[in-house]
Amino acid sequence: VIGTTRRAFLTGAATAAAFSPKLSLGQARPRIVVIGGGFGGATCARVLRGADRQFEVTLVEPNPTFTACPFSNVVIAGLRDIAGQRFGYDAIRAEDIAVAHDEATAVDPQAGRVSLRGGSTLDYDRLVLAPGIAIRWDALPGYNEAAAVAMPHAWLAGDQTLLLQRQLEAMADGGTVVISAPANPFRCPPGPYERASLIAYYLKKAKPRSKLIILDAKDNFSKQRLFQNAWQQLYPNLIEWVSLSNGGKVISVDAKTRTLVTDFATYKADVANVIPPQRAAGIAQLAGVTDATGWCPIDPVTFESRLQPKVHVVGDAAIAGAMPKSAFAANAEAKACAVAVAALLHGEMPSPPKLINTCYSLVAPDYGISIAGVYHPAGGQFAEVEGAGGVSPIDAPADFRALEAAYADAWFRTITAETYG
Amino acid sequence: VPPLRGQNPADIVAAMQAFRSGERPSTVMGRIAKGFSDEEIRAIAAWVAEQR
C-alpha cells in the first residue's frame, strides 16, 4: 500500500516541481519520513506539509488510532470515557501526508532508509523520530510485561489505562492503593501526582475508608507544594507520600501477591500502579540515536541527533534540557523541528527557536494547577528563560483553580484539534 | 473568549505587554509573557494577525 502511495506521489513530482516556488526545475522532491504519530510526530508532519507543498511527507505509525495520555488520569478515576482520548489519522491523510500504518523496524542513517515490518522500505532526505517512550522492563526486579497485568503501569494510554480503572472499581472499600513513582527523567513529571489526586477523589466519594500511598524514588516533584497543599485541603489523611529519603524507592515487586518492596518496608497493595523507569522507544535505539542514558541527545536549534546526521528527534524521546517530557513540549518541539528541517532542505540556516510549555494537572475535576516555562537554546541545550514561567500561586482562590481546570480542558481540545482535527 | 486569529496586531501587543507587567490579571499568560521581548511580542502579534 505504501509503495503505491509513494509511486503516485513520485509520478506527480516532475510536473509539480515546475510550479514550485521553492525548488528549481528538475530537482527531486525532498522526502521526509516521520516516525511516530503522537503529539510530536503528527504535528511535525503537518507543519512540514504546510512549509512546502513539494515535500513528500510520510508518517509511520503502527496504530490506526492514537490514544492520548493527557487526561487519561481522568479516565482512570472513572470520570471520563476513553473514547475521548482517541484520535484518528484521516485529517492528516487528507492533507496529502502518506500515513503508513506499519512499524519501523530498522533505520540505516548512511543509506537514508527506513525498513518497515510489512517488508517495504522508505528512503528519506531527512528523518524525524518522535517515537515516545518505552518501559524499561529490565529496570525493576519482578516487573515485566506479565506483571504489568496484575500491577498496571498505565503510562502508555489504552488498555493499561482501562485495566487500572477496572481494578480500582473492583477494589473493596478500605483497600490500599499503592503508586510507585520513578526517578527523573520520565514522561509527564506531574503525572503520578495528578493520578494520585484523581484516584483520591474517586476513593473519597466511592470508597472512603481506603487509602493511597505514593512510594517515590525522588525527594521532590513537579508542583509539589501545590499538590500537597491541595491534598491536605481536599483529601486529608487519604494520601501518604513516601519520599526517597524516607525509604520510598521501590527496589522490587511481586506481582502474584501485589507486593512492593523498598529498602525499609514491604507494602501489600490491593491495587498497585507501578510507574517504572523509562527510555526512548525502541526505534531510537535501532537508529543509533540514544546515548548511555537511553534517551536521545539533540541540537536544540535543529533537533538533529548529536549521534547520527539527518536524523532529528522530538518529544519525550529527546533530551531537551530544561523542557519536560510533555505533550505540550512535544508539540512545540515538533513545530520548531519542522521549520528547521524545511530551512535545511531549502539550503537555509535555521534560526534558534523560543518555545513554551504549560502542563496543567487536575487535583479534582474543578481544581486545576499549572506549571509553565519559556525555553531557548543556551550552551547547546534548552534552558529556561530567566524571569519567566513558574507555577500557579499557592494561595489562589477557588475560582482561580476552577479557571485553570477549565483551561486544562480547553488546552486538551485545542492541542488535539491542531494535531488530529 | 474571542478567537486570537485575525485580531489587530496592536491589540495583541498591548495585551501581551499588559500580561507581562501584571497590569492585566491572568492565570498563566503573565508567566509566559515574561519570557518574551517587545520585538518578539510584535513578531508573535504579526503572525497571529495573519492567520485566518
Image (spheres, grey):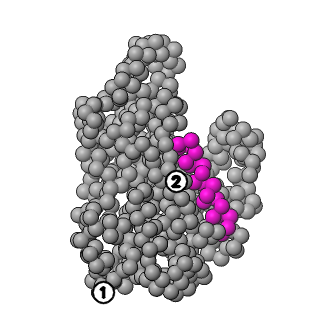
Q: Residue at x 62, y 50 (%)?
A: B37
Query: Which quadrant holds the C terminus of chain A?
Result: top right
Q: Nearer the viewer, residue B15 or A269?
A: A269
Mark 2 or mark 1, earlier in chain: 2
Quadrant for residue A393, please give it: bottom right
Q: Main secondary structure of the magenta part?
A: helix
| Element carrying mark 2 | helix
A261 to the left or right of A50: left
x then y, percent, for residue A366? 64, 68
- Above-or-below relation of A383 to A341: below
Q: Is residue A29 magenta?
A: no
Which range is magenta?
A401-421
Question: Dot 2 surroundings within 10 Å: few (below 14), some, or many (20 or more)?
Answer: few
The residue at which mark 1 appears reads as A265
Q: Nearer the viewer, residue A184 or B46?
A: A184
A7 to the left or right of B43: left
Disc sitting over residue A83 in the figure: 2
Q: Chain of mark 2?
A: A
Q: Is residue A414 magenta?
A: yes
What type is the residue that disc 1 sits on?
A: Ala
